[in-house]
Image: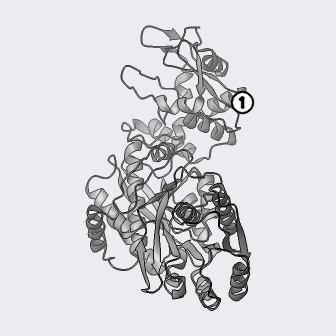
Amino acid sequence: MARTARRGPIARGLIAFGLLLAAGALAAAPLTPQEQAGRKLYTEGASASGKPVRALIGAQDTPLDGTAFACANCHGADGRGRPEGNVKPPPIPWSELARADGHRRAGGRSHPAYDERSFSEMLTDGRDPAGNRLEATMPRYIMAHEDIAALVAYLKRIETDFDPGVSDDRLRIGTLLPARGALAELGRAMEAVLRAQIEAVNAKGGLHGRKLELVTADFAEDRAAALRNAERLFRDEQVFAVVSPLTVGVEREIGELAERSGVPVVGPFTLRTQSQQAVNRHTFYMLSGLAEQVRVLVEFATRRLALADPPVAVVHPDEPEMQAVADAAVAALRKRGWGRSLAVHYPSGRLPAAELVAKLQQSGVQVVLFLGTDAELERLGGPIRDAIWTPYLLAPGVRVGRAAAALPTTLGERVFLAYPSQPGDITPEGAAALGALQRAAGAAGRHQPAQVSAYASLRVLEEGVKRAGRELSRAKLIASLENLFSFETTVTPAVSYGPSRRVGALGGYVVAVDTAARAFRPTGGYIRIDDQP
C-alpha cells in the first residue's frame, strides 16, 4: 500500500523546501480509481477487477497465484527495495525507472530508461529495455493490459502515497467510545485502560521507535450522531488504525466505513461479528459474537446431549440479522444429523410466551435454542413451569444469563449457556498487568469485561505493528495480523487470524445452569469451532 513517512536529510535551501511542500500536497490528494487498482496490485498481487494474476517462477516458468508474489513483498511498501540475503531488489518508483540517464545494475547489466511499453514488456517477458534478461529472482507475470496500466499509474504516485497516522516518531490510533449518557462510565473505563497501556508502551520507547497517540471520538447515544463521529474519526483525524471501538447497533456501518477508508479496526466491542457476510478485510474481532456462540451450542448439543435426531426449535425475534443466525444454526444442526430442526420466529419485542410454549410442546420439541433477550426468556419461565414442559434450553449467555438463573426448577439441569470467554482465561501474568494498568488509571472495579476487551485488543494491535516492522503500512499490518496464530493476550483465549478468518478466539465455553441452586457450573473446556462451517 503506502510507504511510511521517514526522516530524510535536512532540506537544502528553498528549492528543496518547496519540493517537500509539493510532496505534502500530493500526499493529501486521494488516489484515483486507477491508482487504487494499481496499489492493490502492488501490495496484494491481486487485480481490482477480479481478473487472475499469475506469477511465472523459476526456469520452468511454474505458474503460481500472484498474491504470493506481490511487488511490495520484495520492493517494500515505498518501492525503494529491501535487500534480503544476496537478493537486492532495485528501487521501482516511476521517477527512478524513468531516469533519463538510464541504469547500470550490479553485474554490469545496463539499460536505458523505462517507458510504459518497455515496462509492460519487462513484466511479461522478463527483459529490460535493452533486451537483457532480468535476474532469476524476478518473476514474470501474466496479467491484463489494464492491470499493467494501473500498476504504472500507482508507481507514479507511490512516493507521495503515505498512510495517515504514521510519522517518523509517532503512530496515531483512534477509538470510538461513549463520552456521555448511560454508557459514559463504560466508555471512561475502557479509555482509561487504553491510555494507561499506551503510556506503558511509550515509556519503553514505543513501537519501532514510534510513540503511540490515542484519538477518541464519542459513541453518541443518538445513532446518527455516533455514525457522524465515526466518519470524522476514520476520515478526518488521520488515524492509522482504530482499536476497541464500541460498535453495538452500528456494526455493519462501521465495517463498511473501515473498508471504504482502508482503516484497520482491531477488537470492536460488540456481540455481532458480521461473520455471516463476506470477510471484511479491515475488521479483526477478538471474541466470538452471537453467531459463533450459537455454533458452539450446536457443537455441544449434538456431541454431548444423549439425543438421536430430536425435534429442535431455533427461536428468534423476527429481525434480519437474527434470522441469518437462526438459519445458520438450523443448517449446522441438520449437517450433524439433527434433521428435524427448524427456525421459529416471533415479532421483535413482542414474544407471545404462553402461545409459543404451547405450540412447541404440542410439536414435541425436545431442544430449544433461544436467541431472544433476557426479558423475553424471563417471560417464558412461567408458561414453561405451568405446562410441566422440560425441554433442553440452550442460549448465548451474554444475552440471557440473568434470566436463565431464574428459570423454573422443573427444568432441572437442562439449561445450557455459551460464553466466548471465562474468568479462567485470565492468567496470573495477565491479571497482574491489567491490574497495574487499572490502578494507574484509577479505573479498577466495574466494567471488567469491557476493560479486558480493550486491553486484549491493544495487545493484538501492538503485536501486529511489531511484526509489520519499521517500514509500517496498513497493508503490512493487515498481513501481519492475518499471520497471527495462537497469540496469547493473557486475558482471553488464544487469538488466531487468517486470510478468511476475522474472529480471533473462534469458539467458547458452555456452562450448565443449576436451576435449583441458582448457580452455574462448567461442562468442560473450550470448544473450538475453527474447522466448523
* Rendered position, 220 above or below 380: above
- Where is residue 2 drawn, in percent x and y? 52, 41
- Where is residue 89 drawn, in percent x and y? 45, 23
Q: Secondary structure at mark 1?
A: helix
Q: Residue at x 27, y 74 (%)?
A: 439
Q: How did the renderer colour the structure?
A: one colour
**Total number of numbered discs in the rendering:** 1
Q: In the figure, is residue 10 to the left or right of 403?
A: left
* Rendered position, 283 above or below 472: below
Q: In the figure, is residue 487 to the left or right of 363?
A: left
Number of other residues with Cα within 10 Å of mark 1, as a class: few under 14, some 14 to 19, many 20 or more: some
Q: Quadrant of residue 342?
A: bottom right
Q: Quadrant of residue 1?
A: top right
* Rendered position, 345 above or below 58: below
Q: Nearer the viewer, residue 18 or 222?
A: 222
Q: Residue at x 55, y 18 (%)?
A: 100
Could you tell me the amino acid type at mark 1? Glu
- Where is residue 387 drawn, in percent x and y? 65, 89
Regarding residue 37, the answer to whether it shows in the image is: yes
Q: Nearer the viewer, residue 236 or 427?
A: 427
Regarding residue 156, the answer to whether it shows in the image is: no
Q: Which residue is mark 1?
A: 146
Q: Residue at x 72, y 30 (%)?
A: 146
- Where is residue 331 drawn, in percent x and y? 68, 58
Q: Nearer the viewer, residue 106 or 380?
A: 380
Q: Residue at x 58, y 56 (%)?
A: 258
Q: Quadrant of residue 329?
A: bottom right
